[in-house]
Image (tube, helix red, strand yellow):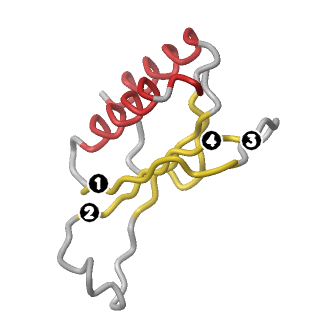
Amino acid sequence: MPYFVTEPVKIEGTSLGYSIYPYQFSFFDNFRAKEENSVRLYIFELKESEFIEIEKPLFKKDFSISMQNSVVIEETLKKFVVENEQYVKNIEDLQKFFSKTHEASK
């Protein structure tokens, strides 16, 4: 799984997508200036469309950049899907999606 995704990625076998954005600190960010979180994961429901279009955001979490963050992000995605199984459409496609991301993160 890549460390930075700047556009939404569909989670195959579900009606969900995710995106990872680098967090840009600003001098206006006084309340976050000392935090080490530097990427933000969004999980969202997708519209029924041939394109990847966001219906609504469902989850947001910040992570610090490290060599392990792709594993942590993958685990977070899996946990979210398991806890919200109403978004799962095809379990086989979902398993293929996570097996591809697991291989890519090695």
Label 3: which secondary element: loop
Q: Nearer the viewer, residue 31 or 9?
A: 31
Measured in 3D between alpha carbons, the distance from the residue under mark 3 to the one under mark 2, in whole angstroms, is: 30 Å
Measured in 3D between alpha carbons, the distance from the residue under mark 3 to the one under mark 4, in whole angstroms, is: 7 Å
Q: Which residue is mark 2?
A: 37
Q: Residue at x 72, y 47 (%)?
A: 53
Q: Residue at x 27, y 38 (%)?
A: 72
Q: Is residue 92 above or below residue 36?
A: above
Q: Are marks 3 and 4 in contact (CB under 8 Å)?
A: yes
- Mark 4 and mark 2 lie on one chain; the one further toward the N terminus is 2
Label 1: which secondary element: strand
Q: Are marks 3 and 1 in contact (CB under 8 Å)?
A: no
- Residue 66 in percent (x, y) is at 21, 50
Snapshot quadrant of residue 92: top right
Q: Which residue is mark 1?
A: 63
Q: Are marks 4 and 2 in contact (CB under 8 Å)?
A: no
Measured in 3D between alpha carbons, the distance from the residue under mark 4 to the one under mark 1, in whole angstroms, is: 21 Å
Name the amino acid type tagged 1: Phe
In front: label 4 or label 2? 4
Q: Which mark is residue 45?
A: 4
Q: Which residue is mark 3?
A: 47
Label 4: which secondary element: strand
Quarter of the picture holding the C terminus: top left
- Mark 4 and mark 1 lie on one chain; the one further toward the N terminus is 4
- Mark 3 and mark 1 lie on one chain; the one further toward the N terminus is 3
Measured in 3D between alpha carbons, the distance from the residue under mark 4 to the one under mark 2, in whole angstroms, is: 24 Å
- Mark 1 and mark 2 lie on one chain; the one further toward the N terminus is 2
> Is 52 displayed left or right of 39 in the figure?
right
Measured in 3D between alpha carbons, the distance from the residue under mark 3 to the one under mark 1, in whole angstroms, is: 27 Å
Label 2: which secondary element: strand
